[in-house]
Image: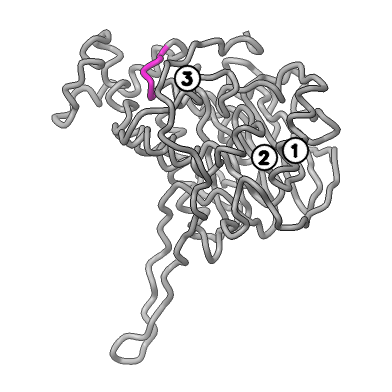
Amino acid sequence: MSCVTVLAGCADRSTSRSGRDASAAASPEPSRGAEKAADTEDPAEATEPEDAGELAADTAEPPPRSEPDASGDIEEAPPPVWVGPPPLVMSSKGRVVAIGDVHGDLDATRRALRLGGLIDEDDHWIGEHSIAVQVGDQTDRGDDEQAILDLFEVLAQEAYAAGGAFVSLIGNHEQMNAQLDFRYVTEGGFADFADFAESPDAPADPRVAELPAEQRGRAIAFLPGGPYALKLAGHNVVQIVDTTLFVHGGVQPSHVGAGLGLMNAEHSAWLRGEGELSSLWSSDASPVWDRTYSDDTTAEGCALLEETLDQLDLERMVVAHTVQSGGINTACDGKVFRVDVGLAAHYGGPTQVLEILGGATTILQ
């Protein structure tokens, strides 16, 4: 493994933040709670939200403590159980590791996790108090999606129990699958979820019935309220750790004004089958679709980025979504890091992850 330090910044900043509540800050312990133009899909239309505003601060109960039983002996408490989604704002106790799009390639996913010192050879968490953020797009373009999604659920539990955190964000491809947009699904990807069509609990949904037979199992799994949509409902679109904002596409000042916590909550509720997505999510400026900071970023784009970070009192943004042919890089004077390096076999990119430690950012490769 080699690494290159590319930026050093200040680790502590003031807590006067707009667009998010400083009281929402939580650490995992104790309050844990082709390539460039390949994604040119037209997202589905949706209704406007009923209202906008700042979501109340996220809270999470601490893990259970050991208590004495009737004999006075200490009875071991069960290990803490992670229930997502995580709080919008988290504080680290050391390392933060960012991983880009993995697109259905389990081998590439494991390589990235091991490069970051997060899992052992048996795929168990060894990252201790580290916080890892996979910045969306676990699905499409590869055959191992179910294994990746299941692994990420296990790692979220194991990291939480160890005092760390594993956070996987929603990307445009997760949203597309819940919208039954399967244009980038492989044959193996359909086969992987085929058995869901045989379940006696499969919903009699006309949208499923209209699909070819080989696609129906996947539709049942990912349709809002379906088993894998419910897993994804436990994931955020936007995550803040210390002074870094993580998002698949990008966050703009208008998103901050609407409330980042509210956006997370709206998307999660939709995946649970509890309402519709607002028109925000079908826009090119949606947090899962935006390429302002990842594709030919202009001076105007950098100005938008600076305004967004100033509103939130943050140092930097980490985005994915657009494959960076030269590997992880920065733009806008180091205020944005682009971490989609095309890890998956579909692209054949290098294995790289971004480490943030003590305000310094390092590319591991």
Measure the C-alpha gap from mark 2 to mark 3. 23 Å
Mark found first going from the N terminus, 2 or 1? 2
Instruction: Give the residue at mark 3.
Output: 140
Which picture quadrant has residue 213?
A: top left
Considering the whole magenta stretch, tell me its main secondary structure: loop
Residue at image point 64% right, 49% down: 241
Location of the N terminus by quadrant is: top right
Q: Residue furthest front?
A: 51
The residue lying furthest to the left in this view is 200
Where are the magenta residues, as a range?
Answer: 178-182
Q: Residues within 10 Å of mark 3 (few under 14, many from 20)?
A: many
Residue bearing the label numbered 2: 115
Amino acid under label 1? Leu
Q: Position of residue 25 (x, y in %)?
A: 60, 57
CA separation in Å, label 1 and label 3: 25 Å
**Residue 15: quadrant of the picture:** bottom right
- Tell me whether circle 2 and circle 1 mark residues in contact (CB < 8 Å): yes
Given residues 83 and 224, the one toward you in this image is 224
Residue displayed at 42% across by 16% down: 45
Secondary structure at badge 2 equals: helix
Q: Does the magenta segment cover residue 283?
A: no
Element class at badge 3? loop
Task: Give the number of the mark in front: 1 or 3.
Answer: 3
Q: According to the image, label 1 marks what residue?
A: 364
Kind of residue sitting beneath label 3: Asp
Compared to 73, does 341 lie above or below? above
**79 above or below 358?**
below
